[in-house]
Image: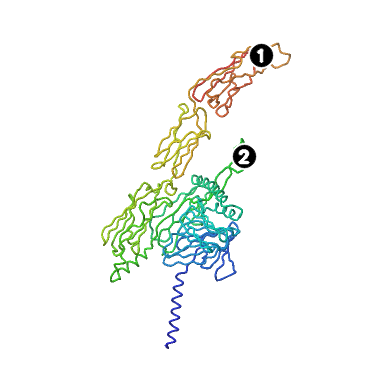
């Protein structure tokens, strides 16, 4: 072969190798959910918009367009997800992944996206941009976009942190979970608002409308969003009590890149994970999560519950001035699935490299250390991740993370390059929320080492304090006027039990353990409501109509006395001998003049029943009973009254008609 031929062959080989290397970096997103009108324009087919379907691949430079009440959910190679919201047009400008490092830049041309980003590795990036601003995400969830009239760009974070930077002025602002950052206008300054439910769909939709109204001042914006946030929080708190789902947790550490678990939800609740709506199978949901095999590190997947609540109807009044109830839909984050993934193939490669190496560079040997700060607060998510380093030169070394009775697997074969990270879920449901420390123990060529991380488990956080208190009715004694209830799921918690009688507050008591509750009843029949609320806001409620009928004396008063003589003139020819009278009687001395204390009233005349009332039929203390008499006879009308306290009274009236 000539010299020029060798050059040409080398260039062809170089181009081929370059193409393979470039292809290795390219990646794609997978469509996991689609609703309504959604189209996909491939970068290779400019101007052609095809229908998008679940399972389609979205690659670099592709665009997605959605219509009214439509969305498309996409999962990326590391498990991150992006949901293109309604009336949006976005381009996936950069979409690459190599060795588990994700690089993504999404250009929002119109509309907004909801995102749930996994923790980014060194060298990776997760960004969103509009013509106005760019958001750099650091492993968090929220919503980023621009208003319908393009008057503002905003970043609304549910948790985590990010940087929002103005593309023209370069101004930056740091945004944390529970905050919403806004750039209004071409050169507007960054406005950061503390909004507890930042990222929530309902609040973001309201934000869109408000920001497009240029007459709304900053103060008015804060005031309006504050009221919306408070109203939304009230409904979300109520939703947690009644329509929240329960999840089977993932293992703390896994070595496979596809896992399955389950959730159970109340009737009528819809569940979605990472933007994908799941199929309801008799209120049970099968959840499958996956990512690329080389995407090592902590994984989290947020769950959203959607259901209906009964709330007071606005600007409507019902009977007796009571405000009627209307059904209103609410969507809220109802759980987070967390785990730590390590691809065992990486460890095998690393161990093989060490074995094949003739010598280990001493400068690359890592010392044992724990990087997780101590103490560490456990709140949301309800887990702690212990990270650190160890001497990687001893493949026979052992590394364990311990907490109480829990002990991890040996993390040495699961960790590469002498770096480890291990996540432990902590909650009342896991039974470990009283633990105060995590211990890391390493044994290897460099000796035995031990480190302790102190835990500050915050029991006011819903992902730690997951169990709702439980209230059950035990018994009641109407004569003693007391009732007993049982409080459960209160051990190691702080639970406030509030009481109401017929909707009126009756006091509250604080409990720190499961207890039997004795309630003193008020005379009469009343509706008693007990509500148990723990320190995370989880609550349960029970109502019972109960009666209190203490011993007391009552009497039957017959109006006109118990005897009446009726003198009658001779009847006209061919007329009936029947005479009609009205017997009146009243009950005297009934406690609080409340008919609820009366169990039974019966009025009879010979073998004929004139009046027979029980329970709710008894609404008065005065009665008029029609009586039919006959000439020339004496008739006795008997009155029988039985009280709820067990006492019985008899009386009556004798009529003599001549």
| Residue receiving disc 1 | 631
Q: Position of residue 453 (x, y in %)?
A: 34, 52
Looking at the rendered structure, the secondary structure element under dot 2 is loop
Above or below, 149 against 651 in this view is below
Q: Quadrant of residue 373?
A: bottom left
Above or below, 312 against 624 in this view is below
Looking at the rendered structure, the secondary structure element under dot 1 is loop
- CB under 8 Å between discs 1 and 2: no
Q: Quadrant of residue 536?
A: top left
Asked if residue 396 can be seen in this view, the reply is yes
| Residue receiving disc 2 | 317
Above or below, 358 against 5 in this view is above
Total numbered circles = 2
Q: Position of residue 601 (x, y in %)?
A: 56, 23
Q: Earlier in the sequence, mark 1 or mark 2?
A: 2
Task: Give the distance between the C-alpha atoms of the residues marked 1 and 2, in whole angstroms.
Answer: 59 Å
In the displayed image of the protein, which residue is found farthest to the bottom?
Answer: 2
Q: Position of residue 255 (x, y in %)?
A: 38, 60
Give me the residue at 62% from left, 18% from top: 583
Q: Quadrant of residue 468?
A: top left
Residue nearest the observer in this picture, 71 or 534: 534
**Dividing the image into 4 quarters, which one contains the C terminus?**
top right
Residue nearest the observer in this picture, 233 or 347: 233
Residue nearest the observer in this picture, 300 or 133: 133
**Dividing the image into 4 quarters, which one contains the N terminus?**
bottom left
Mark 1 vs mark 2: give the one in front: 2
Crowding at dot 2, Cα within 10 Å, few <14 / some 14-19 / many 20+, comes out as few
Asked if residue 35 can be seen in this view, the reply is no
Q: Position of residue 528 (x, y in %)?
A: 50, 34
Crowding at dot 1, Cα within 10 Å, few <14 / some 14-19 / many 20+, comes out as some
């Amino acid at each position: 072969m000539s010299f020029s031929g060798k050059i040409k062959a080398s260039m062809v080989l170089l181009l081929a190798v370059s193409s393979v290397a470039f292809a290795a970096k390219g990646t794609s997103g997978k469509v996991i959910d689609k609703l309504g009108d959604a189209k996909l324009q491939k970068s290779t087919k400019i101007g052609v918009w095809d229908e998008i379907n679940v399972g389609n691949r979205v690659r670099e430079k592709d665009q997605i367009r959605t219509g009214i009440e439509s969305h498309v959910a996409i999962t990326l190679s590391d498990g991150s997800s992006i949901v293109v919201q309604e009336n949006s047009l976005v381009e996936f400008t950069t979409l690459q992944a190599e060795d588990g490092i994700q690089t993504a830049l999404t250009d929002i041309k119109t509309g907004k996206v909801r995102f749930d980003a996994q923790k980014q590795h060194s060298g990776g990036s997760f960004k969103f941009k509009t013509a106005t601003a760019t958001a750099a995400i650091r492993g968090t969830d929220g919503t980023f976009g621009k208003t319908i009239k393009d008057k503002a760009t905003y970043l609304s974070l549910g948790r985590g942190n990010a940087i929002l930077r103005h593309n023209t002025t370069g101004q930056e602002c740091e945004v944390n979970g529970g905050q919403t950052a806004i750039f209004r206008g071409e050169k507007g300054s960054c406005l950061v608002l503390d909004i507890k439910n930042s990222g929530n769909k309902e609040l973001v939709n309201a934000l869109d409308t408000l920001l497009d109204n240029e007459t709304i001042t900053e103060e008015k914006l804060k005031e309006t969003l504050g009221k919306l946030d408070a109203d939304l929080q009230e409904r979300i708190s109520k939703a947690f009590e009644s329509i929240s789902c329960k999840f089977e947790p993932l293992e703390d550490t896994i070595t496979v890149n596809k896992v399955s678990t389950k959730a159970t939800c109340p009737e009528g609740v819809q569940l979605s994970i990472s933007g994908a709506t799941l199929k309801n199978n008799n209120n049970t949901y099968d959840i499958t999560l996956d990512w690329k095999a080389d995407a090592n590190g902590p994984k989290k997947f947020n769950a959203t519950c959607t259901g209906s609540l009964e709330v007071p109807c606005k600007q409507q009044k019902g009977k007796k001035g009571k405000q009627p109830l209307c059904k209103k839909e609410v969507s809220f984050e109802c759980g987070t699935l967390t785990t730590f993934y390590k691809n065992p193939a990486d460890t095998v490669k690393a161990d093989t490299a060490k074995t094949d190496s003739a010598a280990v560079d001493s400068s690359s040997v890592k010392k044992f250390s724990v990087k997780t700060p101590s103490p560490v607060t456990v709140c949301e998510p309800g887990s702690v991740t212990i990270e650190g380093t160890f001497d990687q030169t001893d493949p026979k070394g052992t590394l364990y993370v311990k907490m109480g009775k829990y002990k991890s697997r040996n993390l040495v074969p699961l960790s590469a390059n002498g770096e480890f990270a291990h996540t432990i879920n902590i909650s009342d449901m896991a039974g470990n929320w009283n633990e105060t420390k995590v211990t890391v123990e390493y044994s290897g060529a460099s000796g035995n080492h031990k480190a302790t991380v102190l835990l500050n488990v915050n029991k006011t956080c819903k992902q730690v304090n997951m169990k709702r208190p439980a209230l059950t009715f035990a018994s009641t004694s109407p004569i003693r006027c007391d009732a007993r209830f049982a409080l459960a799921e209160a051990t190691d918690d702080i639970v406030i039990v509030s009481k109401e009688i017929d909707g009126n507050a009756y006091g509250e008591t604080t409990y720190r353990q499961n207890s039997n509750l004795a309630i003193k009843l008020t005379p009469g029949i009343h509706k008693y409501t007990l509500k148990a609320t723990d320190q995370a806001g989880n609550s349960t409620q029970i109502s019972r109509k109960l009666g209190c009928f203490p011993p007391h004396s009552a009497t039957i008063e017959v109006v006109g006395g118990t005897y009446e003589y009726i003198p009658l003139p001779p009847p006209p020819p061919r007329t009936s001998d029947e005479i009609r009278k009205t017997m009146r009687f009243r009950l005297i001395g009934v406690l609080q003049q409340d008919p609820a204390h009366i169990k039974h009233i019966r009025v009879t005349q010979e073998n004929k029943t004139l009046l027979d009332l029980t329970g709710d039929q008894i609404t008065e203390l005065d009665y008029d009973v029609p009586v039919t008499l006959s000439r020339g006879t004496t008739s006795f009308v008997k009155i029988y009254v039985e009280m709820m306290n067990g006492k019985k009274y008899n009386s009556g009236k004798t009529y003599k008609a001549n």
